[in-house]
Amino acid sequence: MKQSQKNLDFALQSGRMGTWEIDLVTNVVKCSNEMLYLWGVNSNEFDGDRSILQSRVHPDDLEKMRAAIDKAIANEVIYEMEYRIFPFPGLERWVISRGRCTFAPGTKKPIRFSGVVYDITEKKVKEEELKAAIKIRDQFLMMASHELRTPLTCMQLQLQVAEWDLKHRFPEAFTFERIETNIKKNNQHLSRITRLVDQILDESKISQGRLIMLFEHFDLSEMVVDLIEQYKVTAEFSGVEVLFSPTEKVSGMWDRFRLEQVFLNLLINGIRYGNRKPIHITVKKEGNKALLSVRDEGIGIKSEDQKRIFERFERASHDKEVNGLGLGLYIANKIVTDHGGEIRLESEFGKGSKFIVVLPL
């Protein structure tokens, strides 16, 4: 008998489960030590006062719990309810109680209500995490669909116009200037699609902890010069002047491909939010750190938004007309952090923004 009780106690402790019994005549409650532990009540001090246990039930759940108990007794059915408790101030836990009423022999008079209670906090946390993940996934799919559809639609329209011109306005519609303009536009659309796909893949790698860094020795100033030259046409087409005058060689062991990704994200953001004003680039050494800064003279970022823009699916602007998945700065920040560095932001709303990439030398 003693061994059976020990086995039961062990099962109750292992499963974070307790038992309870309410004497409906005296209103005195008997609880197992496991239940009192869940409630944060000292078993040596508990005298069966039901109000002590009820005082630790969440106020929003207490009346529902009482109503569920009354209903179970009145209808002679099993009682079951999930609710929140506060074992200690500020500590919320979820439990589920199941029980039934015992009636006096040969009568409908309820004399005892007893059952078990389980701690389901971990289950609830996982459910909330799953809901949040599904919500994020749905938001992401909606944004990705919209962002990918926009450039594809533009390319499709341009091809339809070209097809019509080929049938009805050949060759006068195909001037060198028009062909050159269409090629530039389509290249921009393709670059945008490529960036979006790359961001989607990188976000997946980050989520799975598979973003790999391949370090090599190179000059940061040289990298910036090369990328500005590559994106010169894009900047000119957007009416933006990119200003950079390298003053020194700043070399270190970094992942060039990933840092190119970081710089291009900051540069493209400058073009996107810079109000067609110049973008100022600097690269310099400061002690044992390398500093790469990108400053625009655009709309700036409100102080309350400056922390969140490095989070997933967040953007520097709430303007719905500004495209983007809200992954660029999130990925850039992760890349720089994996280098042992950080991205600093200096911005004042209406006066532009300055992003400073700090890397160890």
Image: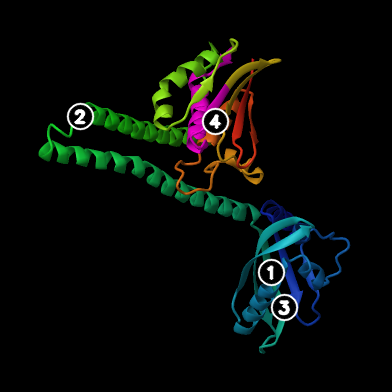
Q: Nearer the viewer, residue 285 or 39?
A: 285
* Camera-side mark, 1 or 4: 4
Q: CA distance from mark 1 to mark 4?
A: 43 Å
Disc with the residue nearer the chain's start (2 vs 4): 2
Query: Position of 260 compared to 105: left or right?
Result: left
Disc with the residue nearer the chain's start (2 vs 3): 3
Quadrant in which residue 247 is drawn: top right
Q: How many marks?
A: 4
Q: Is residue 268 magenta?
A: yes
The segment highlighted magenta reads 252-281
Q: CA distance from mark 3 to mark 1?
A: 26 Å
Residue 60 disc label: 1
Residue position for label 4: 332
The amino acid beneath tag 2 is Thr
* Camera-side mark, 2 or 4: 2
Q: CA distance from mark 2 to mark 4?
A: 41 Å
Q: Is residue 164 magenta?
A: no
Is 251 placed above or below 227 here? above
Q: Can you say which quadrant of the picture contains the N terminus?
A: bottom right
* Camera-side mark, 2 or 3: 2
At mark 2, the secondary structure is loop
The amino acid beneath tag 4 is Ala
Residue sitting at x 59%, y 78%: 77
User: At which x and y percent is residue 99?
Assistant: 65, 71
User: At which x and y percent is residue 184?
Assistant: 32, 29
Disc with the residue nearer the chain's start (1 vs 4): 1
Q: CA distance from mark 3 to mark 4?
A: 63 Å
User: At which x and y percent is residue 340?
Assistant: 64, 23
Disc 2 crowd rating (10 Å Cα; few below 14, some 14-19, many 20+) is few
Residue position for label 3: 112
Residue position for label 2: 175
